[in-house]
Amino acid sequence: MTAITEQKQKKNESFFSKNVSAIALSSAIKALGGFIGVYLPIFFVQIGGNTLTLGLLTFVASLVQLSFLAIGGFIADNYGRRTIIVATAFTSVIFPALYALVQDWRIFGLLTVFAATGVVSSPATRATVVDSIPPEKRTTGITAIQVVSTLPSVVSPSIGGWLIVQHGLEEGFRMASVYAAVLAFISTLPLLVLLKETLQPKSPQELDPPLQNNVLNSARSSFWTLPQSLKALMTSYALVAFANGAVSQYYILYASNVVGLTAFDWGTVVSLQLLVASILKIPGGWLSDKYGKKKAMTASLLTTIPMILMFTLSQSLAQVAISALLLVTAGIYYAPAHEALQADLTPRPIRGRINALWDMSNYLALGLGALAGGLAFQTLGPAVPFYIFAVAELVAATLLISKVKEPQTREA
C-alpha cells in the first residue's frame, strides 16, 4: 500500500468516524428523554382516550409516515443526506414541547399524528450509517451505534416513572415532556457540527423524475425487481413490525390493568430491558457477522414466541420482569442483522429509496398491528394482542428460513 493510499484510507476512516459519532451522540442525547413513548399510552387513556382510539391513531400516523418516508427516500438519493437529517432534528423539538401544554385527548392524538412526519429523515440516516461502515463489519458497526444511541435510555424510563409517582400521571408526564424537548434541542448540535455528506447531490440533469410521478412508482417497481432474497427479507421484517405493533402500545396497559404494576414498576422493567439489550447487542452483532445473519435472525424470531406467552401468564412484578427480560434477550439480535443483510443485498445508489420502501412497509405493518392490537385488547381480551404477536413471528420465521439466502458478495 502506497503512502498516498494509506493517507486516503485514514482520511476516509476519520470521515466515517465523524458521521457515526454524530448520529450516535445525537441519538444518545435524545434518548434521555425517550420515556415519553413509554408512558404515552397510559397518559392518553388517563385524559380520555381508549385502546381502540390509540390503535386507530397509530394506524393514521403510519399512513402519514408512508408519505413522508417516500419523500425522504427521494431527497436522500437526489439531494444528499445531511440537510434533511439536520433539518428534521430541529423540528423534532416542537412536539414534546406541545405535549406539555395539551389537556384534551383529541388534540393530543392529532399531535402524535403530526409528529409522525419526523420519519422523513429516516432513509437518509440509515443510508448514511451503512455508507459509513465497511461491508465486512456492518452488523457489528450498526449494533455498536444502536448501543451507544440507546444506552442513556436505560435510565430514562425510571426517571419518567419517578416524575409520575411524585407529581401524578398528568403533571408528571407534562414535566417529562418539557425535559424531553430540551434534550431534543441539545441533540441537534452534534449533527450540525460533525455530520458530513456521503452522497454527492445530483445535477439538475441527473435528477430522478418529478417526485409525484417517481416516489411510489419507483418504490413499487423497485420492490418487484429486487432479488427474491431481498423481497422475502423485507416481507419478513414487515411481519415482525406487525407483531410488534400489535403489542408495543399495550405492554404498559396490560402490566398496569391486569397485573397491577405502578408506573415506576413498569419504568424499572423497561430500564432493565434496555440495560440487557445494551449489554448483549454488540456480542450478538459480532456473532451474526461471524456465523451468519440469517441464523441469528431465525433464532431470534423463534425464541421470542415462548417468551411473549410467558408475559401473558405473569401475575407479579417479578414474573413480568423475568418474562420481559427474556423477551428482549431473545429479540434483540433480529433488527441489526436484518439491517446489515439488507445493506449487503442493496447497491449504494438506491439505498435511500430501498430504505424508504423498507420503512414504508414497516410503518404500514406497524400501524395495522396497532389497530389490530387495540381492537383485540378492548373487545377480545388484554392477552389477545400477545397471541397475535406469536403467530406473526412464527410466519416471519418460516418465510425467512424458506426464502432468504445470504449473498456470496456483499454490496459496498
Image: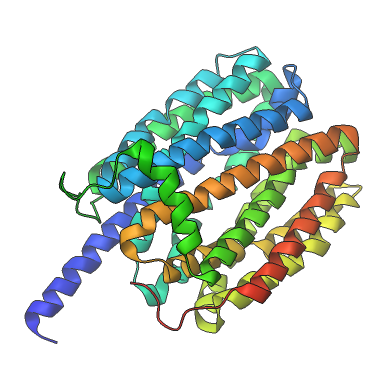
- Nearer the observer, 399 or 241: 399
Quarter of the image holding residue 165? top right
Query: Looking at the image, which residue sits at the far bottom?
Result: 1
On the image, the x and y values in percent for residue 389 come to 77, 53
Q: Is residue 349 left or right of residue 288?
A: left
Q: Quadrant of the C terminus?
A: bottom left
Q: Position of residue 164 (x, y in %)?
A: 68, 27
Q: How many marks?
A: 0
Residue 66, percent from left and from top: 51, 39
Residue 401 picture quarter = bottom right
Q: Quadrant of residue 231?
A: bottom right
Q: Is residue 393 above or below residue 8?
A: above
Report whether residue 28 is seen. yes
Q: Nearer the viewer, residue 138 or 26?
A: 138
Residue 59 left/right relative to 32: right
Which quadrant is the N terminus positioned in?
Answer: bottom left
- Colour scheme of this structure image? rainbow
Front residue of 91/31: it is 91
Give the residue at x 51% y 37%: 65
Instruction: Please tell me which residue is depicted at 76% across the width and 54% down the height of the picture.
Output: 324
Q: Nearer the viewer, residue 74 or 163?
A: 74
> Going 84% across and 38% down the picture, which residue do you hit?
376
Above or below: residue 136 compared with residue 255 = below
Please provide percent x and percent y for residue 241.
64, 51
Q: Which residue is found at the position 64% from the left and 23% from the top?
A: 172
Whether residue 122 is visible to the viewer of this picture, yes or no, is no
Q: Is residue 281 above or below residue 117?
A: below
